[in-house]
Amino acid sequence: MSNWTSASKATEYFMQKTELQNLLDYVAIRQLNAKYNRYADLADGTSYSNLFTEDAQFNIVGEGIYVGREQIAARCNATTTAVHVTTEPEIDISGDTAQQRVRMLTVLQDGKGTRNEFVASGWYIDELKRTEEGWRYHRRRVELDLDVNAVVEKVK
């Protein structure tokens, strides 16, 4: 009986530790999303690209695929008037990798501080990796609900 009790306690401890790690990972990925939005809004390509793995791919479906931090930073720097908003993510964590799907909205600022205009909605579909720097986007795919060319033209 004591072996069963010890094994049961060990299993319970392991499960609690795993649940705690999943919660910590979930919060860290949410923070990654928040930083992504902030750095994108600031057109801070350096900070923005550091949220991706070195060999990341950022695919804006219909517009282009950017590979590596240098290309991703340049793409971020090209958009200076957009406000990025994301909603509650769906996150599936498996060890040091995760999948995420999150609704996104983009709003354009008029530059005068008097008006915002809705530009686009869509989805971010992500593959994430845990790195020494923390969670990072490894593959990020943007699927817009609207015509990508019209959206890109508005935010340039």
Image (spheres, rainbow, N blue to C red):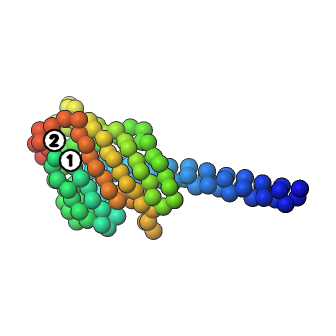
Query: Residue 72: x and y, percent?
Result: 23, 59
Q: Which mark is residue 148?
A: 2
Image point 42% across, 60% down: which residue? 129
Q: Assess whether mark 2 and mark 1 are in contact (beta carbons under 8 angstroms).
A: yes
Query: Residue 95: x and y, percent?
Result: 51, 59
Q: Is residue 99 visible?
A: yes
Circle 2 SS class:
helix
Q: Nearer the viewer, residue 115 or 91?
A: 91
Label 2: how many Cα within 10 Å (few below 14, some 14–19, many 20+):
some
Disc 1 versus disc 2: nearer the observer: 1
**Tag 2 or tag 1, which sits nearer the N-term?**
1
Q: How many numbered badges does the structure rendering display? A: 2
Image point 27% across, 38% down: which residue? 122
Tell me the quarter of the image containing the N terminus: bottom right
Query: Residue 118: x and y, percent?
Result: 22, 32
- Is 153 displayed left or right of 13 in the figure? left
Label 1: how many Cα within 10 Å (few below 14, some 14–19, many 20+):
few
Q: Nearer the viewer, residue 24 or 18?
A: 18
- Is 131 displayed left or right of 81 in the figure? right
Quarter of the figure with residue 116: top left
Query: Residue 56: x and y, percent?
Result: 30, 62
Task: State how far apart marks 1 and 2 are (Cα).
Answer: 8 Å
Q: Which mark is residue 109?
A: none
Q: Nearer the viewer, residue 61 or 25?
A: 61
Residue carrying label 1: 61
Image point 23% across, 35% down: which residue? 145
Circle 1 SS class:
loop
- Is 41 displayed left or right of 78 in the figure? right
- Inspect the image, locate mark 1, and give the three-letter code of the amino acid beneath it: Val
Q: Is residue 154 visible?
A: no
- Inspect the image, locate mark 2, and give the three-letter code of the amino acid beneath it: Val
Image point 42% across, 42% down: which residue? 89
